Image: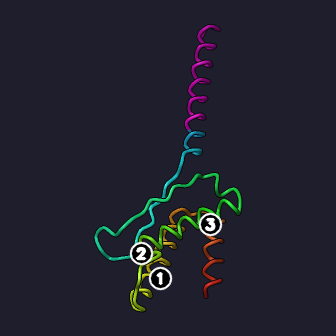
Amino acid sequence: MTRLNSASVLRRTSEHLTAGAAAIAVTFLMLLTVEVRAAETTDSPPRISVSYQDTAFATEEGTANVYRKLKMAARKVCGIAPGNSLNLDQRTKAQECVEAALADAVQRINRPMLTSVHESSARDLG
């Protein structure tokens, strides 16, 4: 291989690696979305999408903020909202739905700090 050809091959390889690294970086910086679903056995339970940035999990404050968003979405999707009047049985079922939907979302996101916030919140309630 001539010197000119090897330089050309190295340049192209370098360009491909740079493009690949850029694609990976963009993927990590993209806005992520998780759906909070009502814990029902219906074919298509209600869902609410919650958007967050992957970088939110770098701090406790960011993680707590994502958890609050998930909790609000779970309450909404399970029918617990300001102004809704539920009897005791409905309220109990709705709260169970919230707990299941929140646990499912936390498990699917699978971030240790978020799991810790969720477990701490569950201990505070119990």
Q: Is residue 124 left or right of residue 30?
A: right
Of residues 10 and 121, the one nearer the viewer is 121
Q: Residue furthest front?
A: 83
At label 1, which amino acid type do we have?
Answer: Gln
Report the residue marked by disc 1.
Answer: 95
How many labels sit on residues? 3
Residue lying at 36% horizontally and 68% vertically, measured from the top left = 46
Dot placed on the residue nearer the N-terminal end, 3 or 2: 2
Q: Which residues are magenta?
A: 1-23
Using the image, determine if residue 41 lies above or below residue 87: above
Label 2 belongs to which residue? 78
The picture places residue 31, in percent across and down from the top left corner, at 54, 48
Provide the major secondary structure of the magenta segment. helix
Circle 3 is placed at which residue position?
Answer: 114
- Rendered residue at 44%/88% (across/down): 92
In three-dimensional space, the C-alpha distance between marks 1 and 2, rounded to whole angstroms, equals 8 Å
Q: Earlier in the sequence, mark 1 or mark 3?
A: 1
- SS for tag 3? helix
In what element is the residue under mark 2?
Answer: loop
State how far apart marks 1 and 3 are (Cα).
20 Å
Query: Given this view, does label 3 or label 2 mark the residue nearer the observer?
Result: 2
